Amino acid sequence: MGQAIGWCHVNEDHYEKARILYDLGRYELAAEALQRELAFSPQNSEAHTLMGRALAQLHRYEAAIAAAEEGIRLLPDSAYAHYGLALVCNLADDLKKARSAMQEALRLNPQNASYFSLQSNLDYRIGMYRESLAMAERGLQIDAEHVGCLNRRAIALMHFGRNQEAAQVLKEALAEAPEDAVTRIHQALLQKELKQEDQASEHYREALRFNQDLDHNMRGIALQGLGEHQQALEEYTLAVEESSQFTEAYYNRGNVYLELKDYPSAIADYTRALQTHSEYVFAYNNRGLARSRSGDKQGALEDYTCAIALSPGSALYFRNRGTLRDGLRDQQGAFSDFSAAIALDPTHVLTYIDRGNIYFAQAKWFQALEDYDRAITLDPNYAIAHYNCGLAYSKLNRNTEAIAAFSRAIGFDASCADYFYDRGVVRANNAEIEGAFADYTEAIRLDPKADKAYNNRGWLSMGRRHHLLAKADFSAAIAINPDYVKALFNRASCCYALGDGPGAAVDYEQILAITKRTGDTANQKEAQDELFKLRLCFWLFW
């Protein structure tokens, strides 16, 4: 009887098996197959490169980089080998080495869309957003259906606020790869930006449903998007337990803590991210946010400055530092930062409004109007820009234009009490009493704590000799704000007109107590004078 002869392992194509396992996300098994391949073929450059990629997915970065570099040593003119090292270094957060390897890969082969996709990602990670967009678009010139380039282009477009274009690009990506988790997550991020919460949640759920083998970090991103903060924290924690050098997982966990307003925990995780990758610019920016919100303004300023030093081409970091400086009353520094942000990204609406607000605070009404008008040109439906124009016009006594601007703001957002209040102020100054009265009433309906609206409506009622109605409004304003000196003066006048001298005296006494405490000498003197005149009136029997 003859013996059965088994297949000799040397004839098994271990490399092809490893490629299939890698594509299936079975990185440990892929690495084992590659070990067998390299035992028989130690000069196989592609096997070393793929080994580096598999080990990087397993967060064994030192060994991964060594394997990828061996692939280059064996075949230095291989674009794929340099691309493989760039992929590994990107995962290891060694962005300088990744960019160097990627540039060499593109020099050797400028016709591979995947290479442009990775270059776009690397550019984006260091804040080179225009370059990131350009690289993605060059990749799409080579392969118009490349899912990676479509995703990279969409993310760059979102950064510049070109959300409708991004939506179309992601639609194309989903048509090409409807089960791709990254595309689904990017689509969800866009829909959150567009306030389409239900659609965003559906894409996060689809990302989880289509990809049961998502790594812990990606699962955390999807769960975080669904508002499942505790589960997301658990996934990110598992990710950093697998690899204590997993920068992105620390960063993402910090973002969850930031959403939960647990600022100490957020700061701790951003700090861990920076300990593993000292040039991780996103962590500097978000640690700045957490520090600012926790009251550490100086620490926040330092973090934003570090972010700008690492990514001087990012308008976002200048905007954030400008906002912080404005809050610290450093108007010159804030103005400089907002101007830098506009130079880098002249399409961002809020930056024009922020800089316009500085002009406004400096009583530079015309310059403020210019910035508000630029914001309206970019987004004609942006209510705040129209409202701010109204404020500037009112300062210039251009009441008709102010009323028109406030009316446009109300047309876009009729839920804001301030829009009605300030239109009421201008209408009152313009002798449009009925319109002003209606605006103050609507402001009070929208915000029952609108003390100034009560006071101003009371003043209009007093002008009509409706003293009881006026007194009721002044009293409402004082109930909201007991230190409201102007309302106390007005109620005292109203009491006097109603023959209630003692009531007027009580209000003047209250004004004296407040102004003594606050050091308001002008109002203190006026209250003393009015109280003296009141007490001279013999018919009050004092």
Image (spheres, rainbow, N blue to C red):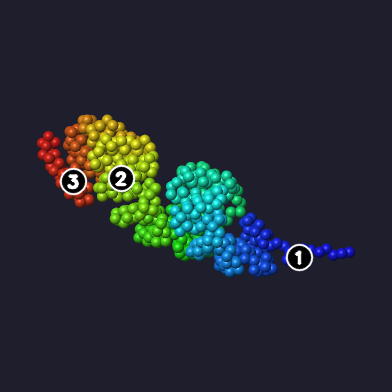
Rounded to the nearest whole Å, what is the CA distance between mark 3 and mark 2? 37 Å
Residue 464 in which image quadrant: top left
| Circle 2 crowding by C-alpha within 10 Å: few under 14, some 14–19, many from 20 | some
Dot placed on the residue nearer the N-terminal end, 1 or 3: 1
Q: Position of residue 377 (x, y in %)?
A: 36, 42
The amino acid pointed to by label 1 is: Cys
Q: Residue at x 26, y 40 (%)?
A: 394
The amino acid pointed to by label 2 is: Glu
Q: Position of residue 237 (x, y in %)?
A: 53, 58
Q: Looking at this rendering, what residue extends furthest in the right direction? A: 1
Q: Quadrant of the N terminus?
A: bottom right
Q: Position of residue 166 (x, y in %)?
A: 49, 46
- Residue that badge 1 annotates: 8
The amino acid pointed to by label 3 is: Asn
- Residue that badge 2 annotates: 370
Q: Residue at x 43, y 49 (%)?
A: 160
- Residue that badge 3 annotates: 523
